[in-house]
Image: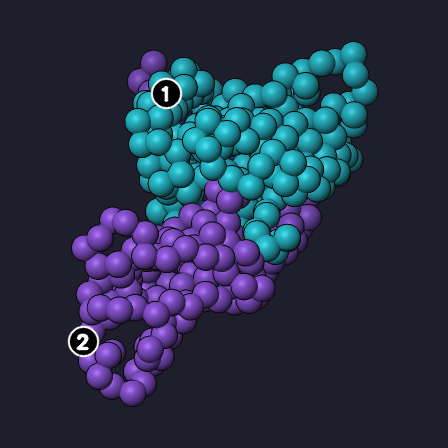
């Protein structure tokens, strides 16, 4: 039985390596005059035909709307420097909003390319390998189980 | 099946979080000591299983093992589902902290219905297992669709159901094999 459970656990761990089933990852390329963004669940699973909304800096009204293509890409042409907001929604409950900082150099330089998610929080979490995150999550669950078991055992000893 | 933050109204999400905490108290109180390791192992399986993504029709679907959790844990499945969803939102940004409650209520309802089906002794065991596994997915999808309709969101009932019907069928099959496995090894985990 132990061997079977261990094998199942190992298989599940292997299949969940290329994970992030719901977290949307953004890759941004600033190629003046365009900003190209790719939205994907993982390296092999782009968000296809997802609804995209773009908000200009300091403005809550929509600048542009559209949909991602078959590879999860969409493009827009910013007209001013500042922090742009981009939201992506696949209509299945998977939604995320990101910010893109467009500097004034964007409009003067010929080509600037910045790859990767510009949000520092996302970048930090993305930098951790998925397998470590899985192990961390499992450790939390088993740790919590141990704590609960310990509390119950202590209560039992007292009574 | 994890609803992300920003889709459902914040007030509804907050109410769902409060309701979830209350249900955790009700379903988790007086948990016998011997049930805790079972809850931990089921939680670990749920945590890893729902990270396996299958790209489908431009979106991402994954197994949930919600029905199986309901069959194994009964009403104790709810605190486990809530904990797993909380860790998934913190570590993987699946769903979101604000929508942990509403996601837990959706999936918890699936596990509860699976448990109700599992308790029907008149029905053959393997049929109960398959129906439980199927219900574990289809009930949360039903609730999720209803919530999407209320929020005026989503690609529509037909699209959602056609996608998740496949997952529910797979889960029904998985529940069958899980129950058969535990019966073959004469485990008391299903007692």
Displayed quadrant of residue B115 = top right
Q: Of tags 1 and 2, which is closer to the observer?
A: 2
Of residues B34 and A61, the one nearer the viewer is A61
**Coordinates of residue B190 in the picture (x, y in percent):** 65, 26
Residue under the image location 22 percent in, 53 percent down: A59
**Disc 1: host chain:** B
Eyeballing the image, is B6 above or below B134?
Answer: below
Eyeballing the image, is A13 above or below B31?
Answer: below
User: Disc 1 and disc 2: Cα gap in Å?
Assistant: 48 Å
Displayed quadrant of residue A14 = bottom right
Residue under the image location 56 percent in, 21 percent down: B112
In which quadrant is the C terminus of chain A drawn?
top left
Residue under the image location 75 percent in, 34 percent down: B176
Q: Is residue A22 visible?
A: no
Q: In this view, does B125 lie to the left or right of B168?
A: right
Which chain is assigned cyan?
A: B
Q: Residue B159 carries which label?
A: none
Q: Which residue has dot 1 on it?
A: B19
Displayed quadrant of residue B73 = top right
Eyeballing the image, is B183 above or below A84?
Answer: above
Q: Is residue B166 visible?
A: yes
The local secondary structure at tag 1 comes to: helix
Which color is chain A depicted in?
purple
Q: Which residue has dot 2 on it?
A: A104
């Amino acid at each position: 039985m132990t061997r079977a459970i261990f094998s199942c656990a190992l298989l599940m761990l292997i299949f969940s390596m290329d994970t992030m089933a719901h977290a949307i990852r953004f890759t941004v390329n600033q190629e003046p005059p365009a900003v190209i963004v790719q939205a994907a669940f993982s390296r092999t699973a782009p968000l296809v035909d997802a609804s995209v909304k773009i908000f200009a800096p300091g403005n809550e009204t929509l600048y542009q709307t559209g949909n991602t293509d078959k590879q999860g890409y969409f493009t827009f042409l910013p007209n001013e420097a500042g922090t742009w907001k981009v939201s992506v929604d696949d209509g299945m409950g998977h939604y995320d909003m990101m910010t893109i900082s467009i500097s004034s150099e964007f409009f003067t330089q010929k080509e600037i390319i910045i790859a990767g998610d510009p949000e520092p929080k996302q970048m930090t979490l993305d930098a951790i390998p998925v397998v470590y995150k899985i192990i961390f999550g499992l450790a939390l669950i088993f740790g919590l189980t141990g704590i609960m078991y310990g509390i119950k055992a202590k209560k039992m000893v007292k009574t | 099946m994890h609803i992300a933050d920003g889709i459902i109204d914040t007030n509804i999400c907050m109410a769902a979080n409060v309701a979830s905490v209350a249900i955790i108290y009700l379903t988790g109180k007086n948990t016998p000591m011997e049930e805790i390791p079972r809850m931990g192992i089921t939680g670990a399986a749920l945590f890893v299983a729902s990270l396996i993504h299958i790209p489908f029709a431009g979106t991402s679907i994954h197994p949930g093992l919600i029905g199986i959790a309901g069959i194994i844990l009964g009403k104790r499945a709810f605190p486990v589902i809530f904990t797993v969803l909380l860790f998934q939102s913190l570590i993987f940004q699946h769903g979101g902290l604000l929508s942990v409650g509403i996601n837990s209520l959706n999936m918890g309802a699936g596990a509860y219905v699976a448990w109700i089906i599992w308790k029907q002794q008149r029905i053959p065991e393997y049929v109960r297992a398959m129906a439980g596994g199927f219900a574990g997915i289809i009930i949360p999808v039903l609730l999720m669709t209803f919530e999407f309709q209320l929020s005026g969101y989503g690609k529509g009932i037909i699209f959602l159901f056609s996608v998740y019907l496949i997952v529910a069928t797979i889960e029904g099959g998985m529940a069958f094999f899980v129950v058969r496995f535990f019966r073959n090894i004469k485990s008391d985990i299903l007692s």
